[in-house]
Amino acid sequence: MSKTRIKYICSSCGYESLRWLGKCPECESWNSFTEEIIETSKRKPVISKSKYEVNTIDSISANEGDRIKTGINEFDRVLGGGLMPGSVILLGGDPGIGKSTLAMQAVANIKQKVLYATGEESEKQIKLRASRLKITSPDFYVQAETNLSDILGAINQLSPSVAVIDSIQTMYRAELDNSPGTITQIRECTALLMEEAKKKHYSVIIIGHVTKEGMIAGPKLLEHMVDTVIQFEGESNYSFRILRAQKNRFGSTNEIGVFEMHEDGLREVKNPSELFLSEREKQTPGSVVTSSIEGTRPILLEVQALVTPSNYGYPQRVSNGFDQRRLSILLAVLEKRANVRVSAMNVFVNIAGGIRITEPAADLAVCIAIASSLAEKVIDNQAIILGEVGLGGEIRSVGHIEKRIAEAEKLGFKNAIIPSGNKKEIKTTAGITIKTFDNLDRVVTNIL
């Protein structure tokens, strides 16, 4: 009989300690240690001596046509084209964001057997949600169970193409002494699901909780184990939801899916640019339109800035949807290179619609929006502004310039302000006037 003892494991980095610590000495996370029961008996590894089959890479059959389409284009886009048989997908997001709704809508469209295993709701609750979402399918099976062995037994009996586990924090393996939701249970349950999915070639969608910091709850190893990690993002004050891939072994991690929450579930947004600009106030200082490339498609976004006098010794620098440190750099460049005095002013920057910009192509738009708000001058509402700003005030070229301009032209924009280095890449500009600049000071002088 194996002996057990208790130790403490950091849920962020996996650091182990014999006693509880408030701060992890490895990753410096606070209150990340959880109590775990571990086995102390040593087991020798067993190496199989029997003959086994090994295949060459050329003899293995696999192609993109094997993917299972969910019928939700935005969901399939983020996954790389659909669900790959044998893959395990981890779907995380804030409470109430719509993780279960998205998973249910996605698998309900598949014209094959699917199993929805839930440890958080009863079968009647699932039925009520399905009625609200108008889901009816003879191949949609529901199981309210938390014992993973029983769930795998049902999977073996039904042989579904896709299985949904809602959520991994409620599942447990009976042979382990740990409680559901602990690091050991989450890790071992996921490992068993991975093994079975790869062996029997069905897809698994695992729904995971997140911590108050927005990280997926459980060990960081969990994200390394699965094939795909997708995060469902959104603000409670907005109906928009962004589906973003953080890891994808079968596709790009740059793609995003845009959804809008309604009473009858999530609806995919066909034209995100038009949606994000639909409520734009066109005669307000500090409002500028830019373009962000998300995966393979451009999305037009409104950058809003507000500059106010500071009544305190230390002015505020607040950004929503834009990197705070990047904002500090751009303010310093504006002050030094473009003579825009904002050192004693409060500066607030917002990306309208609740979306987050991570690429530097929006630098120039942020700078112009700040300068516009400070000078109380309205920017041309038919212009799109693109460019990365360097520390010397130079405007650097950006990628996919033709895609960005084509999207702006499609939505009726007449002018485009771009870096000089991008001019040679543009071949056709029938309905839009191109203005090029190579220095931030010249842009501010000519536009304001």
Image (tube, rainbow, N blue to C red):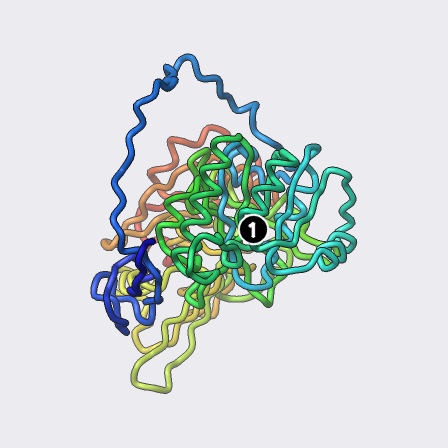
Q: Which residue is rendered at x = 49% and y = 37% of the image? A: 196
Between 224 and 49, the residue placed more toward the observer is 49
Query: At x 71% / y 33%, what residue is drawn?
Result: 111
Which residue is farthest left? 25
Q: Position of residue 85 (x, y in %)?
A: 54, 31
Taking the spot 66% from the left edge, 48% from the top edge, the residue there is 104
Of 341 and 74, the residue lying toward us: 74
Callout 1: 10 Å neighbours few (<14), some, many (20+)? some
Q: Specify the farthest residue to the top.
A: 59
Please tell me in which quadrant of the rendered image residue 36 appears. bottom left
Image location (x, y in percent) of residue 154:
62, 42
Q: Secondary structure at mark 1?
A: loop
The residue that mark 1 highlights is 382
Query: At x 34% / y 41%, what residue is drawn?
Result: 397
Q: Is residue 239 visible?
A: yes
Placement of the C terminus among the 4 image quadrants? bottom left
